[in-house]
Image: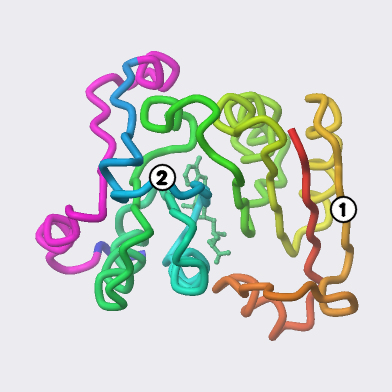
């Protein structure tokens, strides 16, 4: 993807709703330990529940969710600023006050998100990374699930959607390996839709291609 024009200036214009990870420390584990934790009360001026989307892309999902659920605060994380800028600009144009964006890699989430502060994590159409050499980069690799466990409240949930069956099966195994409870599994969302499903950009693309959408709800 070409770098968007005036990207730095555009990111700067979104700073009221955007945090950009300051990673002086290149070692992700050490970076995660150098805490600069969010104060949700200060960010959102309320104490509503917090939901977190990891890999939000252009933000279609999180912005619609924030619009539909003004009593929930959303944190949306994406590692590519060139993509994230669209999410931030559309939130600003919609005047959303219950969404905050964080440009950072999921590996460093503990630097920003306080322990046991999040009620739900959304993993929507995470990159499948089919090659064995990239298994550790999958957002449902056990090393990420261990991070999610520290962020989620007791009884917190992970809601996953994907078009990729091998990633879906891999994820279910990873969740079980980490001691999580699989609350529900759907292998064809079109055949058994759930009420209030908000469709993501990738979901729409795969539905248009006639692909099945897989969905699971997991309790940590
Ligand atoms: C295939 S896109 C899906 C975007 C959106 N969730 C959707 O459903 O349309 C996956 C996104 O996850 C982001 N991503 C992948 N690994 C990540 C990581 N470790 N930390 C943060 N974002 C990540 C990618 O940059 C990409 O934008």
Q: Earlier in the sequence, mark 2 or mark 1?
A: 2
Image coordinates of residue 152 in percent, x first then y, are 60, 33
Is residue 208 depicted above or below 24 in this figure?
Answer: below
Residue sitting nearer the eye, 164 or 41: 41
Residue sitting nearer the eye, 138 or 1: 138
Span shown in magenta = 4-33
Q: So how many labels did they put on this image?
A: 2
Q: For numbered disc 1, what is the local secondary structure?
A: strand
Which corner quadrant holds the N terminus? bottom left
Task: Indicate yes or no whether the magenta region holds residue 99.
Answer: no
Q: What colour scheme has been applied to the protein in the rendered image?
A: rainbow
Image coordinates of residue 97 in percent, x first then y, are 31, 63
Name the mark on residue 61.
none
Image coordinates of residue 70 in percent, x first then y, are 44, 66
Instruction: Work out how far the residue at label 2 is from the one at label 1, CA to CA, in angstroms.
Output: 29 Å
**Circle 1 is placed at which residue position?**
184
Residue sitting nearer the eye, 193 or 173: 193
**Circle 2 is placed at which residue position?**
47
Task: Please tell me which residue is depicted at 65% across the width and 46% down the height of the picture.
Answer: 129
């Amino acid at each position: 993807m070409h770098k968007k024009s005036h990207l730095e200036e555009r990111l700067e214009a979104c700073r009221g709703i955007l945090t950009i990870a300051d990673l002086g420390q290149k070692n992700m584990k050490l970076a995660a330990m150098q805490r600069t934790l969010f104060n949700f009360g200060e960010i959102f001026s309320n104490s509503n529940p917090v939901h977190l989307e990891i890999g939000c892309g252009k933000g279609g999902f999180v912005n619609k969710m924030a619009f539909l659920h003004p009593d929930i605060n959303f944190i949306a994380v994406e590692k590519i600023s060139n993509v994230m800028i669209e999410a931030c600009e559309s939130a600003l144009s919609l005047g959303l006050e219950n969404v905050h964006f964080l440009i950072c890699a999921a590996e460093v989430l503990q630097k920003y998100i306080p322990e046991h502060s999040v009620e739900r994590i959304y993993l929507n159409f995470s990159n499948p990374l089919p090659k064995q050499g990239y298994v550790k980069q999958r957002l449902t690799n056990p090393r990420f699930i261990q991070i999610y466990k520290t962020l989620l409240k007791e009884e917190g949930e992970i809601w996953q959607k994907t078009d990729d069956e091998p990633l879906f099966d891999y994820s279910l195994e990873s969740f079980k390996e980490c001691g999580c409870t699989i609350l529900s599994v759907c292998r064809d969302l079109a055949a058994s839709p759930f009420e209030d499903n908000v469709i993501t950009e990738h979901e729409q693309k795969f539905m248009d291609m006639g692909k099945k959408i897989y969905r699971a709800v997991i309790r940590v």
